[in-house]
Amino acid sequence: MITAICIIFILGYIAIALEHPIKINKAASALVTAALCWSVYALFSSEGHEASEYLTGHLGEVSGILFFLMGAMTIVELIDAHDGFYIITSRIKTTKKRKLVWLIAFITFFLSAALDNLTTTIVIVSLLRKIIADKQERLMFAALVVIAANAGGAWSPIGDVTTTMLWIGGQITAASIIVQTILPSIVSLVLPAALISWKMKGNLKHADTMAEENINFTTSDFERNIVFGLGIGSLLFVPVFKTITHLPPYMGILFGLGVMWMITELLHSERDEQEKGLLSVNHALRKIDTPSVLFFLGILLSIGALQATGVLTTLANLLNDKVGNITVITLIIGLLSSVVDNVPLVAAAQGMYSLTDFPTGHFFWEFLAYCAGTGGSALIIGSAAGVAAMGIEKIDFIWYLKKVSLLALIGYFAGAAVFILQHLLMNT
């Protein structure tokens, strides 16, 4: 039984990794893999009802992550529908390349922490297409955005799916992950940004200043500011809500979404139905990336089957025997996340290592958040941010490997060194 489940999982994993060559959406592969793994477990386990009971319990944990993601995605789509991101992008006026490198780097870094790395990458890379005419220059800036978005997502409980998973799973706390990881994340960004900045000289060619008169707004300044403020406030309120009520984060995000829903309904009550519909939560819900949500569902349920059958415990014991050093193991997981999606890697780590072995806020969990978040920058396919930038700008895998991978690795290992040194100093 265990062998069959492992084979199904490996084949499903290969199908996910080869999504583009085989032309099958990774969500479909993940859902089929999950269903087959649990079916084999139910059919061949000694007690059939045991699989059903474990699946029901595991689904409760998974649903918390999914509802959180759906709520956050809807809020971001609602801000975008109201042209809210113009409030940030309109501040970018400079045409000096070096200044723009640092401006883009830190806007992306902090925006990613407040929203998420995928959404931030889409917003900023789309912006770059409007202000940078030269294709090669724009590619380097897009690569910088990937590094900055992943670094920014790593230190925030809502900035990256994997960090959110660890937060909801109880492995980390919001305050602890920010304090412990923000400095290493900054280092992992600053070094690559400095190297990119060093190569940049002069001013941008034919930069579009994004004058307001050239943009067709669908909302007024008042509406735009209100929705942007409410949206960002709702996302930032989630950790506060969890701390005060001790309820799961998805309750905080659903509360924020509900408030925004009511206010936007009142805000647009005088508009005609067609125009009001495009600015509504109903429309935002239809625009969220549902295949990604289903992918997370499938992969997390697949990992749950491996956890239920004891495969992950065996793998953890094997790693401990062969490698031994938990710091090295975490660094390896981070590098693997540049080849394999970091969501199943972190989910597997959650199943491999219990809170009994490593309690909430332990060095391992916080270091894992950093490594899984920033390690994916080493390859363009190693993160959701990278894949998004690749799709928008048609970034070539080999180009990124030659021009950017080494820069990302320098930042990754430098940040990891800072994290380890920081931990040693704080515990002496």
Image (tube, helix red, strand yellow):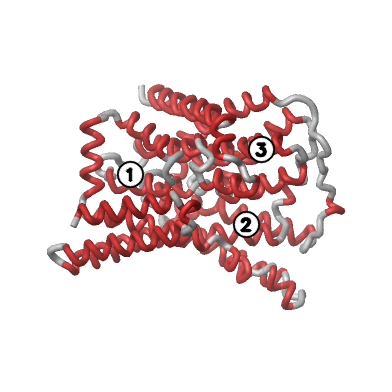
- Which of the 4 quarters of the picture holds residue 74? bottom right
Disc marking residue 349: 1
Q: CA distance from mark 2 to mark 3?
A: 30 Å
- Which of the 4 quarters of the picture holds residue 230? bottom right
Q: CA distance from mark 1 to mark 3?
A: 34 Å
Name the quadrant of the C terminus. Answer: top left
What residue would you read off at disc 2? 231
Q: Is residue 323 above or below residue 382?
A: above
What residue would you read off at disc 3? 139
Q: Nearer the viewer, mark 1 or mark 2?
A: 1
Give the amino acid at mark 2.
Answer: Gly
| Disc 2 element | helix
- Could you tell me which residue is drawn at 21 percent across and 52 percent down? 3
| Disc 1 element | helix
Give the amino acid at mark 3.
Answer: Leu
Label located before the other in sequence (1 or 3): 3
